[in-house]
Amino acid sequence: MNELWNEILKQLSVALSETAVSTWFTECEFVAFEDDNLVICAGSEFRKDVIEKRFAATICGIASSLLAGDIKLTVLSDAEEAQAYLGRKQFNGDSEFARMKDFTFTNFVLGEENRWACGISRKVSEEPGNGLYNPVFIYSGSGLGKTHLLYAIGQAIKEKYPDKNIVFAKGDDFLNRMIQAIREGEGKKFRDEFRTADVLLIDDIHVLAGKRATQEEFFNTFNAVYEAGHQIVVTCDRPPKELSDLEERLRTRFESGILCEISRPGLQLRKDIVAFKAAQAGLELSETDVDFIAGRLTCNVRQLEGAIKNLVAYQGIMGKISGEALIRTVENMCQTEDRRITPELVLKETARYYSVTVDDIKSNSRVQKYVKARKMAMYVLREKLGMTFEDIGTLCGNRDHATVINNFKQVFNNKSTAEVREALNVIYMNIGDKP
Ligand code: ADP
Ligand code: MG
């Protein structure tokens, strides 16, 4: 990482909200600094757009004052562009594979809850495209290892078959890139990129539900790859039959493949995971400690990891973890666990994002920011909790369901705008539903 970029990031986090920094800059990489030109890689076309439009001036300002010169900024969209920019020099940035490196089969702790999903994933990696295991549909709640397995598959295939074209995308990347490609008349390039995949790995496919145009494109891509006998693995937060807004033919395709559910880890698996992650992080825990952590934190693996990370940090600073510190850390994490996503939480966090109150959302006032918050709340209630339009209407100040549908559609149709995306990112994060 480059010093200059590090310093700019530091100053940016003073100038902007923490959320803005984490939304737009965590995946940003330094590429080069030449002739008063700072070159960074945004990680996606969409982020590049936002950074150029909204933050370029601030970044240039900071850079110019740091270097006492007139600094220009060039934003590249992805690792490929960064590599092209650098020519023969290696771009050692955050390539897809660099990001994946800890998510291997070796680092995946097995239990009854995930044995089938992991077994199939291994089979697929040994013989991608073998008709027996195609397509593979892995589903589970959040934080249970879907992305981990998908990355493990990608890496294992890359190692065994270095020449295979492995195409990896998150559902919303697929969405954003498609919209962008169509807007710029580059539909063909987009299609070719996905359709020439030997192995197509798509994470979080549920974001495509309800998005007609994208589904159509995805269906065509899916068919092209599948009919060429190439491997497809997708992950999703629910089984195909519950993807109510998914086109029938797409759902049928998934159902005809291999379905793998990962269930929430039971006590034994949680203990194994805690022990494994602690050992890996050089954290000394007694058996009683492991039992305590695994006994209290029952939600998902991400949470167990969070506890280990906190304890590692604590050990790093204090030298040794006292019994009391252990209990406090774990109890703190439990409180977050109790914060299940409820309609009230959605209203509260949406209101907070727009700096209004829950009562404003429920009121009849047409003040613009109340209206915005109201529409957004309706959208999130539908998307995240799957509430009926009637129930949403009742909750949001006794409105009829046609009004709710109307509002829902308005947010839906604007989903690719920076404003709505940022709002959704923040609200989802604050209701504890990390993407
Ligand atoms: P999902 O995609 O299902 O939301 P992730 O794959 O991102 O979940 O998993 C969340 C975190 O938990 C990741 O850091 C992952 O490495 C870890 N994890 C999940 N399951 C396991 C497991 N069985 N063994 C080790 N780590 C796991
Ligand atoms: Mg995931």
Image (tube, grey):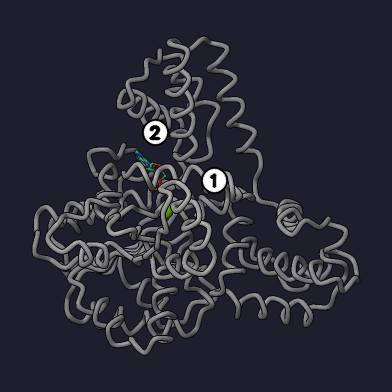
Residue at disc 2, secondary structure:
helix
Front-lying residue, 70 or 214: 70
Which residue is under mark 1? Answer: 13
| Between discs 1 and 2, the one toward the N terminus | 1
Residue under label 2: 269
The amino acid type, in three-letter code, at marker 2 is Leu
Tell me the residue at 22%/51% (across/down).
Answer: 92
Which numbered tag is attached to residue 134? none
Which mark is nearer the camera, 1 or 2? 1
Determine the residue positioned at 56% across, 74% down.
Answer: 417
Q: Position of residue 434 (x, y in %)?
A: 53, 51
Q: Is residue 335 above or below residue 75?
A: above
**Residue 129 percent across, percent down from the top left:** 16, 68
Quick one: quadrant of the N terminus?
top left
Amino acid type at circle 1 is: Ser
In the image, residue 134 sits, relative to residue 115, either above or below, namely: below
Q: Residue furthest right?
A: 364
Horizontally, residue 132 falls left or right of residue 223, namely left
Residue 414 horizontal/vertical position (percent): 60, 77
Locate residue 409: give its quadrant: bottom right
Secondary structure under tag 1 reads helix
Q: Is mark 2 within 8 Å of ligand 1?
A: yes
